[in-house]
């Protein structure tokens, strides 16, 4: 695999890297400005702005129907925006049809041509671009090696397993050396083990060849594992664009906090610039950037909460008294549900740090560091 | 790793087994007995159908001596080929326009397209007759078109009903085709025509061929519409044979039927041989 990847790198450096773009253009791979897509009365994508940098692994993450696939299809040219502008490497795409865009797509259903064998499938794009036969054959060989499908070139797609079809779909797109590779939930149909293996392989491949990947998924774990940056979409809007870590640790909306991992929401109002009042009257020093009196929520991840014996919590941390509701033992962690008088909190203690096991009915104090919270609206 | 549907391989037991056999036998008798009777009596010496008096080839002799029958067969073949080619092209285009595009008036077109399948043949025939009666002069203005002869009228009216059947068959095939395959081809730099030629057409080919086969059959079969629109100079064989019946059933009809039967079987065999030859060539 490593030798192959090195070969890929060399192959790519000759073409993609040495492109005729000026520096400024080369740093931006895809740019969407105020892009909206309507289907009749339905607004699938609602006025989004998005800049994807060259060489980046960018994921569009969201539940089904959030507009992520429509966004990808607009970049590919399979849908045209109702409003807004879309450019690839500084070139406005406008009404340009998909066959004249410098991108290739890996479809969710793979969309392999069942009447052509693996080689013909992979060579289709090259043939359409009139690459001469010998060169075409070399490139197909290279792509087949790249996805480790040696010896299967003459099989028809119907004779391949799901994972193999997925590799062919990937090779068919990569063989054209696109400036941007678009992937629409390419691992969705694979079983868990194969999916995890392909996640790593895809990420390695992307890192080595250095082309921009735009990856659509509804699987938050997949997005967090693979991406340089993630754009979280909901109901046609791009809610937050950030690194996986920032998305997890510092969500800006309730939806993002809730969609990625598990979390607790403490309802609160802004008292003054950097102080908020929780629903039970406790004051907390957190800067919000919101006007006084705004209703907000503070989100704290379960693993950022700690359980102590009543009144034994350390100073400097915010404390909430409560009673243990239930305990779930997970092997590597213990999950407590703690009832404080106005809500329930979920606390996750790593098994190694869990200390004495508490049971339902125990009176405890839950503490957290204000620095590990995030203020969300909505 | 087989994807096939699991099938029960258990044999039926006891008397149900015999019932099943008897049933299949009955079905075969029902299908093929009339054909066997027809073939056998085409070699009958007697002029009375249903009474065997001895072997004779005289009816085939009559057939060979009868120019009218041979001319009508030739007309049928011409009409059949022309109407099949035209209706396969137009029917496939109609199916594509409904399945792959959205346009104003599409729903109405969709509904009207299948009318010839639903309405009775006689209605269709009267419609065509009236239509040609009113418009023949207009058509004749076009250079090279002469509707008075009747051959063109036959072709046009056969096209009129065949389009529906072809588009139904092709559309069923198209509906089962993953549209993202066409998108993938476009994404891989194929123009619209290349997408159709390289991806769509090969995929729907079984439907197109099925539609063509249906069109051939319907065209050769048609009596009602053809007898309304055919002119004096252009009587297809179906109409000719039907006319012969009015003078009483003659074993000549049997002989004609056997000739048509043998010819169509030869066609089927030839197409199978051709298909096998081309597919084995592709395999190499």
Image (cartoon, helix red, strand yellow):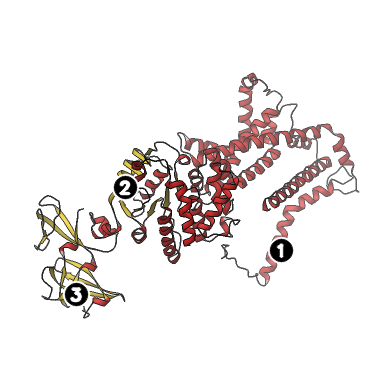
Do badges 1 and 3 share one subunit? no
Q: Residues within 10 Å of mark 2 (few under 14, many from 20)?
A: many
Q: Is residue A73 left or right of residue B173?
A: left
Q: Is residue B244 left or right of residue B80?
A: right
| Mark 1 vs mark 3, CA separation in Å | 76 Å
Question: Is residue A299 among what the camera can see?
Answer: yes
Do badges 3 and 2 share one subunit? yes
Q: Is residue A110 left or right of residue A223?
A: right
Which chain letter matches label 3?
Answer: A
Q: Nearer the viewer, mark 1 or mark 3?
A: 3
Which residue is denoted by mark 1 in the rendering?
B22
Quadrant in which residue A230 is drawn:
bottom left
Which chain letter matches label 1?
Answer: B
Which residue is denoted by mark 2 in the rendering?
A236
Residue at image position (37%, 44%) is A26
Whether tag 2 and tag 1 are in contact, CB under 8 A, the answer is no
| Mark 2 vs mark 1, CA separation in Å | 64 Å
Dot 3 lies on which element? Answer: strand
Q: Residue B140, position in %: x, y? A: 65, 20
Per the rendering, the mark at residue A103 is: none
- Camera-side residue: A57 or B79? A57
- Camera-side residue: A108 or B167? A108
Whether tag 3 and tag 2 are in contact, CB under 8 A, the answer is no
Q: Nearer the viewer, mark 2 or mark 1?
A: 2
Question: Is residue A165 among what the camera can see?
Answer: no
Residue at image position (40%, 56%) is A207
Which chain letter matches label 2?
Answer: A
Per the rendering, the mark at residue A324 is: 3
- Camera-side residue: B218 or A161? A161
């Amino acid at each position: 695999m490593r030798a192959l990847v090195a070969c890929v790198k060399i192959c790519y450096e000759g073409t993609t890297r040495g492109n005729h773009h000026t520096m400024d253009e080369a740093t931006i791979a895809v740019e969407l400005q105020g892009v909206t897509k309507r289907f009749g009365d339905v607004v699938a994508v609602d006025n989004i702005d998005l800049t994807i940098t060259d060489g980046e692994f960018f994921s569009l993450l969201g539940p089904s129907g959030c507009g992520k696939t429509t966004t990808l299809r607009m970049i590919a040219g399979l849908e045209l925006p109702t409003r807004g502008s879309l450019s690839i490497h500084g070139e406005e795409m406008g009404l340009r049809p998909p066959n004249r865009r410098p991108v290739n797509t890996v479809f969710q259903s793979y969309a392999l041509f069942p009447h052509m064998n693996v080689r013909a499938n992979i060579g289709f794009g090259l043939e359409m671009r009139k690459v001469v036969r010998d060169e075409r054959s070399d490139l197909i060989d290279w792509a087949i090696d790249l996805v480790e499908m040696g010896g299967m070139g003459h099989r028809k797609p119907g004779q391949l397993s799901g994972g193999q079809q997925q590799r062919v779909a990937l090779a068919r797109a990569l063989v054209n050396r696109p400036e941007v590779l678009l992937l629409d939930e390419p691992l969705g149909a694979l079983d868990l083990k194969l999916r995890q293996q392909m996640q790593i392989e895809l990420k390695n491949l992307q890192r080595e060849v250095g082309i921009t990947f735009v990856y659509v998924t509804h699987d938050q774990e997949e997005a967090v594992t693979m991406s340089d940056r993630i754009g979280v979409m909901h109901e046609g809007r791009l809610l937050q664009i950030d690194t996986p870590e920032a998305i997890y640790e510092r969500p800006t909306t309730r939806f993002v906090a809730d969609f990625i991992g598990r979390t607790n929401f403490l309802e609160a109002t802004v008292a003054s610039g950097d102080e908020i009042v929780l629903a039970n009257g406790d004051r907390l020093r957190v800067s919000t950037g919101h006007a006084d009196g705004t209703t907000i929520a503070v989100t704290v991840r379960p693993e950022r909460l700690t359980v102590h014996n009543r009144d034994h919590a350390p100073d400097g941390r915010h404390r909430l008294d409560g009673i243990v509701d239930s305990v779930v033992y997970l092997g590597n962690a213990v999950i407590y549900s703690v009832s404080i008088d106005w809500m329930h909190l979920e606390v996750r203690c790593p098994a190694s740090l869990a200390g004495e096991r508490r049971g339902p009915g125990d009176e405890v104090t839950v503490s957290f560091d204000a620095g590990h919270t995030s203020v969300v609206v909505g | 790793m087989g994807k096939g549907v699991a099938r029960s391989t258990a044999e039926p037991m006891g008397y149900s087994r015999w019932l099943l056999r008897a049933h299949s036998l009955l079905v075969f008798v029902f299908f093929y007995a009339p054909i066997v009777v027809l073939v056998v009596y085409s070699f009958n010496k007697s002029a009375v159908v249903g009474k065997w008096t001895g072997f004779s080839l005289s009816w085939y002799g009559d057939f060979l001596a009868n120019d009218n029958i041979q001319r009508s067969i030739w007309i049928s073949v011409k009409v059949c080929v022309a109407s099949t080619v035209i209706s396969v092209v137009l029917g496939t285009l109609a199916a594509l326009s409904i399945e792959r595009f959205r346009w104003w008036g599409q729903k109405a077109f969709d509904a009207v397209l299948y009318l010839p399948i639903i309405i009775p043949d006689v209605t269709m025939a009267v419609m065509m007759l009236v239509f040609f009666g009113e418009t023949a002069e207009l058509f004749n203005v076009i250079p090279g078109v002469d509707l008075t002869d009747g051959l063109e009228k036959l072709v046009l009216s056969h096209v009129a009903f065949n389009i529906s059947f072809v588009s139904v068959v092709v559309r069923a095939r198209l509906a089962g085709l993953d549209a993202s395959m066409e998108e993938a081809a476009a994404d891989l730099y194929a123009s619209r025509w290349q997408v159709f030629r390289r991806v769509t057409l090969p995929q729907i080919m079984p439907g197109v061929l099925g539609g063509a086969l249906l069109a051939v059959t319907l065209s050769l079969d048609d009596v009602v519409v053809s007898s309304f629109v055919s002119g004096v100079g252009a009587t297809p064989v179906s109409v000719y044979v039907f006319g012969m019946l009015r003078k009483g059933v003659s074993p000549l009809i049997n002989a004609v039927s056997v000739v048509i039967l043998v010819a169509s079987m030869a066609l089927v065999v030839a197409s199978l041989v051709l298909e096998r030859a081309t597919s084995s060539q592709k395999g190499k």
